[in-house]
Image (cartoon, helix red, strand yellow):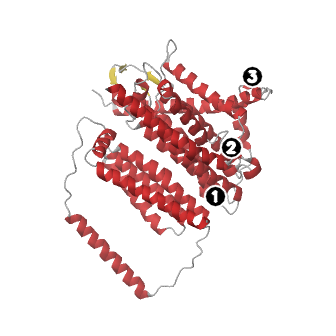
């Protein structure tokens, strides 16, 4: 089990790094899909089958398809941007700042002790326990999220259609 | 007590291999069945030269495809060009792992060379490769991945028709996935489980098509669109798009695309059988036979529709989806919920 976790974590980290380092946006998007799969595998190891399936359906199956869609429609065939000249000071400053941020984050993560989460209702499967919590204790956040998404959809339609007049 | 794990692993591998071989044979003969049935619908004979009634035609097709010239378009992305057919075919095969094709295929424990082997540990006695407790979500997750083949193939071909075909198909599949998911929620409410094995068991007294006729119709329409079959085969609009994202593909790469396409049809039929037609359940005949009969009846329906209906236009497809299918799906869920609530009181 532990070995599978380390393999998946390694894949997730490497593909996550490649997302950032690829110059072509399409390749970045493809590596992000690999990353989603590795993370879904880690969810599976944590016995969160429902989350793993939803991760693949929503992120890999829907959102990334739309990303690819947009990238292809914009036709970014070549990275047309020339590599910009950078001053040495800029480089050193940037690297120092990045290292400092990483150190700060690592320190913060090590410092925080997360309180144990809510115990899943006994005798129920993964999907049932999520549903039960979602529709009892977390009903208000759940409903607020749906209203928020509706607002986003209305906003997108307004933005898209305002030019058509 | 000897260590059972290696034996169980080998047996599981053999089981997976068996299912895969049967599935690939079914794909080959679905192609032949399509050509034959379409032939008879159009008052032709269909292929009848290779073997008795043309039964060896799939073999001849495969050999022909293997020996054809392999062409990779210059200027495209070579890696993605090779990857795209694989990305189409593999997600078409994967859902098979969760679809139950029989109740129990082996006894709970068998003795092998004097050792007693407990088969329930790895579910080897079950007529399904893996009884996943989110089985249906798993099937949909794999189904949602098949879009990538079209998108990547269309993009890597470096051809305008391919790109437009790929984009069109992905818009179609992303939209109709929603209706595919919404149309089966009624079934989930009745069965109370996402596990396909449990859904089949819940249909012991009555098939769900009797309680969910609208759900079945909506599911089949969405499945036709997901498989990009007539009347939704907009990627094969020859007069507009040549052959869509498959334009630049030849030889076995094209063959693998075709395998993915027919694999999708078979999996969609098997899933409809499992969700609405009682799965492997039926009198007299063994469960596997019932499963096959129901699945191939639906495959026949797919072919029949292809021989009968004209093609939609793209705006009609989107209108049908968002203005007809979506409200009907929601109404179906609402009424199923109301009826279940009243019957429980």
Q: Point out which mark residue B53 bears.
A: 3
Q: Quadrant of the N terminus of chain A?
A: top left
- Ranked by sequence position, the earlier of labels 2 and 3 is 3
Closer to the camera, A77 or B201? B201
Left or right side of B180 for B163:
right
Instruction: Check contact, mark 2 vs mark 1: CB within 8 A.
Output: no
User: Which residue ends up furthest to the top in the rendered image?
Assistant: B284
Q: Position of residue B44 (x, y in %)?
A: 80, 27
Q: Nearer the viewer, residue B4 or A144?
A: A144
- List the residue tagged with mark 2: B312
Q: Is residue A161 above or below residue A127?
A: below
Name the chain under label 3.
Answer: B
Q: Are marks 2 and 1 on the same chain?
A: yes
Q: Is residue A95 visible?
A: yes
Judging from the image, mark 1 belongs to the subunit labelled B
Instruction: Judge depth for marks 2 and 3 and give the one in front.
Output: 2
Could you tell me if the residues under marks 2 and 3 are in contact, i.e. CB atoms within 8 Å? Answer: no
Give me the disc on residue B175. Answer: none
- Give me the residue at 67% from left, 32% from top: B305
Dot 3: within a 10 Å radius of its alpha carbon, few (fewer than 14), some, or many (20 or more) residues? few
The secondary element bearing badge 3 is classed as helix
Horizontal relation, residue B271 to residue A123: left or right: right
- The residue positioned 61% from the left and 47% from the top of the image is B319
């Amino acid at each position: 089990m532990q070995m599978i976790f380390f393999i998946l974590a390694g894949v997730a980290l490497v593909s996550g790094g490649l997302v950032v380092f690829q110059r072509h946006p399409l390749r970045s998007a493809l590596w992000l899909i690999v990353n989603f799969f590795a993370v879904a595998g880690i969810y599976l190891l944590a016995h969160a089958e429902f989350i793993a399936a939803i991760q693949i359906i929503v992120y890999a199956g829907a959102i990334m398809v739309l990303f690819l869609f947009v990238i292809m429609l914009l036709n970014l065939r070549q990275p047309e941007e020339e590599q910009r000249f950078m001053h040495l000071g800029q480089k050193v400053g940037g690297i120092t700042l990045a290292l400092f941020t990483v150190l700060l984050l690592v320190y913060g993560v090590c410092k925080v002790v997360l309180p144990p989460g809510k115990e899943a209702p006994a005798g129920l499967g993964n999907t049932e326990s999520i549903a039960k919590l979602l529709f009892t204790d977390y009903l208000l956040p759940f409903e607020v999220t749906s209203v928020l998404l509706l607002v986003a959809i209305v906003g997108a339609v307004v933005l898209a259609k305002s030019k058509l007049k | 007590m000897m260590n059972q794990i290696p034996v169980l692993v080998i047996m599981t591998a053999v089981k997976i291999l068996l299912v895969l071989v049967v599935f690939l044979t079914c794909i080959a003969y679905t192609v032949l069945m399509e050509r034959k049935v379409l032939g008879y619908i159009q008052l032709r004979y269909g292929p009848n030269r290779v073997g008795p009634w043309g039964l060896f035609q799939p073999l001849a097709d495969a050999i022909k495809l293997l020996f054809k010239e392999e062409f990779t378009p210059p200027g495209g992305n070579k890696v993605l060009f090779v990857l795209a057919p694989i990305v189409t075919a593999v997600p078409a095969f994967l859902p098979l792992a969760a679809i139950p094709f029989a109740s129990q295929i082996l006894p709970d424990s068998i003795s092998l060379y004097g050792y007693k082997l407990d088969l329930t540990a790895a579910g080897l006695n079950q007529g399904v490769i893996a009884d996943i407790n989110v089985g249906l979500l798993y099937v949909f997750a794999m189904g949602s991945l098949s879009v990538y083949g079209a998108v990547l193939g269309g993009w890597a071909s470096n051809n305008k028709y391919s790109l437009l075909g790929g984009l069109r198909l992905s818009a179609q599949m992303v939209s109709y996935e929603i209706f595919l998911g919404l149309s089966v929620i009624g079934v989930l409410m009745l069965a109370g489980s996402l596990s396909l094995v449990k859904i089949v068991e819940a249909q012991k007294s009555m098939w769900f098509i009797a309680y969910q006729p609208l759900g079945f119709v909506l599911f089949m329409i969405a499945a036709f669109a997901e498989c990009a079959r007539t009347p939704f085969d907009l990627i094969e609009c020859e007069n507009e798009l040549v052959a869509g994202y498959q334009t630049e593909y030849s030889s076995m790469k094209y063959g693998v695309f075709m395998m993915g396409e027919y694999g999708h049809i078979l999996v969609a039929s098997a899933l409809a059988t499992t969700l609405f037609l009682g799965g492997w359940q039926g009198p007299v005949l063994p469960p596997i036979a019932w499963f096959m009969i129901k699945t191939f009846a639906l495959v026949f329906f797919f072919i029949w529709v292809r021989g009968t209906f004209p093609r939609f236009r793209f705006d009609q497809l989107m209108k049908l989806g968002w203005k007809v299918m979506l409200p009907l799906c929601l109404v179906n869920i609402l009424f199923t919920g109301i009826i279940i609530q009243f019957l429980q009181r």
